[in-house]
Image (cartoon, rainbow, N blue to C red):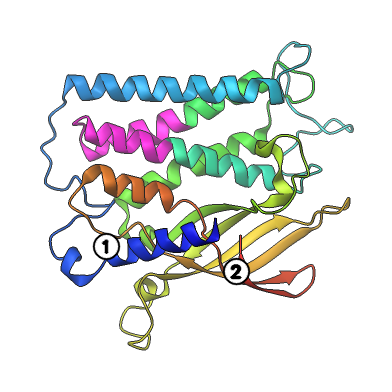
Amino acid sequence: MKRQIRILIIALFMAASPAGLSQGFNAYDSFRDSPNRYQGWRGGLSAGLILGTVGGFYIFTRPIYYDEKSVPFHFSRHPDGHLTFFENDRRGLDKFGHIFSTSLFAQNIYFLSRWSGFSNKTASYLGAGLGIAIMTGMEVHDGLYERWGFSVGDFLANIVGGVFPVAQQNIPFLRHFDYKLSYHFTASQTNDDTIEDYENMTFWLTANPAGLFAGRLPGWFPDFLNLAIGVGLTRHDTREREVYISLDYRLKTIETRSVILNQVIAALDRFHFPAPAIRVSPSFVGFGFFF
């Protein structure tokens, strides 16, 4: 597995060589020369892909979340009666998961909308709006089950996740940052369902120093290298929050001549590949490669 990941990263960096960059487009400018002319067959295919993905996501998560008796709609509350926001037995890490899930929906709906011929403005509304609507619909569905309830914290996290990737398309400064997920595949699961296995997940906010400090860094500092701050959970019963600092790889600006390949690269760039890292809390630990 590690060997395949290294080969993939090397291949992507080779694709980003100066010879390739001079004639290509990246994920942010793939559609800059495209006419804003809606194409019905692309729109129909895109709608089918979105509906199929949402349906598949619901079928996959139903036995995990909804295998219990339904109740009248209600909000998620603490035993003392106040609404829940970020407090739970996962130390709020599930909210980072909501941001990630919604951002994936928004990013891909935006791409499909642009590919279908919608303008950047319309695609931006569709990406953010539909991404948030899909996840909010699922949150309303949570409100019909006693174990869950409609979580205000989840809803707010969905809004952040839906807005951020679309804002990146319209505000160039935000392209120096990204939000990613990594999963420790080599560790044993602490939960029967991977989607709930938060102890093996780490969520990352990454920044690109070469873009943020253009002209002020040494010439040897590579522009494909990011710095990342991650948050996770310890694997013991107390579930302490872990904080990491790591290197990260900037894939989204790799240029190719293919709109589709650019979006595949953009999708891969939502994940933090193994890289050197240190854990700074709750104790100091160094890792040659952290998943």
Residue at left offset 55%, top offset 37%? 158
**Is 156 on the left or on the right of 167, as rendered?**
right
Q: Judge by depth and name the residue closer to the eye, 71 or 56.
A: 56
Give the CA distance from mark 2 to mark 1. Answer: 23 Å
Q: Which residue is mark 2?
A: 289
Secondary structure of the residue carrying tag 1 is: helix
Q: Does the magenta segment cover residue 207?
A: no
Q: Is residue 288 above or below residue 63?
A: below
If you read the primary sequence from the N terminus, does the residue marked by circle 2 or circle 1 appear first?
Answer: 1
Q: Position of residue 70 (x, y in %)?
A: 75, 11
Residue 20 occupies quadrant: bottom left
The N terminus: image quadrant:
bottom right
Q: Position of residue 202 (x, y in %)?
A: 63, 55
Q: Are dots 2 and 1 in contact, CB under 8 Å?
A: no
Asked whether the viewer can see residue 124, the reply is: no
* Magenta span: 106-131
Query: Residue 15 got which mark?
Result: 1
**Is 10 on the left or on the right of 90, as rendered?**
left
Dot 2 crowding, Cα within 10 Å, few <14, some 14–19, many 20+: some
Residue at left offset 41%, top offset 36%? 128
